[in-house]
Image (cartoon, rainbow, N blue to C red):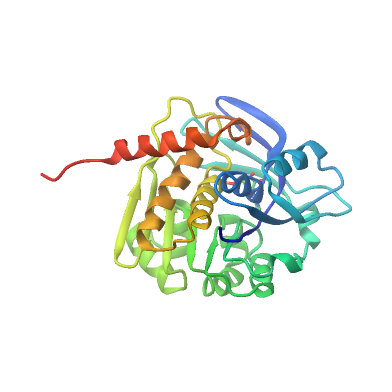
Amino acid sequence: MLQLLVVGSVALDTVKTPFGEGHEVLGGSASYFSTAASYFAKVNLIAVVGEDFPESHLAFLRRREIDLAGLERRPGRTFRWRGEYSYQLNEAKTLETQLNVFETFRPQVPAAYRSPDLLFLANIDPELQHDVLRQVKRPRLVACDTMNFWIDGKRDALARLLKDVDVLIVNDGEARALGADPNLVKVARTIRAAGPKTLIIKRGEYGVLMFHHDRVFAAPAFPLEQVKDPTGAGDCFAGGFMGYLASTGNLGDEALCRAVVCGSVMASFAVEEFSLDRLRRLDYKEIEARFKEFKRLTFFEDI
Ligand code: AMP
């Protein structure tokens, strides 16, 4: 099994959707990513929390066998994010971002983490993402996420980072903002010319597109009867994607397509409930069963 390292946020989220709300629940890009990836591979996590971060959340991450040697606890308050979704559930409206301990955070990669095979730079300040990349031996694959908050606020730092990234995983709105065009195929060309050879665009309930070499691969979102909270779907997608790649060690083209489906499977579970609640009681057999359902969902014969 390959070594998988993630740097990102560990957060307390307050989320409101038309189907309920969660107050200061476990969130953050690295929490979602590592929990989803932990079904496939061992994950090392780098992030920071404040003194107020509940022990019960740490216990949950430990139960998932996520290595927390790189999770610093600092004086101050934990990062907080507050967001809301409208009836369509497709895009979060950020109501408040409190960086708190992230404001002065400088990630220190522990010695044991410095040769990762796969590195995921989950959504945080692109300067911090680059900081981590500089501290490790060049991994076999570097993937990265970001959001409009950084595309608007730290465009130059993000552009520098993208030169060193193999796979960029963003949603359609972010891709359009980065590529400065409404057409996703044109956007893919622009972004891939700026660094990442592979671009994965998440389109919420419309599924995922992967632009890779000369090929575009599409996976639908699983048609679910109950979607309560889309928060973290993107990070769970990335966790399933990278976790699957780490579990097999195969980074070939077909493996990337299967990884996209594993990512879509993990995202489909995550949105069924608030925070990481669905993943708390998920077992690997359910993941395999949904992977098979995805295959049936998309299979068709030649005309
Ligand atoms: P996603 O829904 O997959 O895009 O990610 C949602 C998670 O991102 C939430 O749990 C938030 O805590 C986290 N998040 C929101 N804004 C930021 C930010 N500016 N930096 C880092 N993490 C963030």
Give the residue at x 39% y 69%: 190
Q: Is residue 236 left or right of residue 206?
A: right
Image coordinates for residue 170, horizontal then vertical, percent = 49, 55
Image coordinates for residue 183, horizontal then vertical, percent = 34, 58
Give the residue at x 68% y 49%: 66
Q: Is residue 97 left or right of residue 140?
A: right
Image coordinates for residue 158, horizontal then vertical, percent = 58, 68
In terms of depth relative to the viewer, which is nearer, 257 or 132?
257
Q: Residue furthest right?
A: 75
Q: Residue furthest left?
A: 303
Q: Quadrant of the N terminus?
A: bottom right
Image coordinates for residue 72, horizontal then vertical, percent = 81, 56
Residue 160 in sight here: yes
Q: Is residue 180 left or right of residue 270?
A: left
In terms of depth relative to the viewer, which is nearer, 3 or 221?
3
Give the residue at x 45% y 73%: 194
**Count of numbered tags:** 0
User: Is 134 placed above or below 71 here?
Assistant: below
Q: Is residue 12 left or right of residue 288?
A: right
Residue 109 in sight here: no
Q: Quadrant of the C terminus?
A: top left
**Location of residue 216 (image quadrant):** bottom left
In terms of depth relative to the viewer, which is nearer, 71 or 150?
71
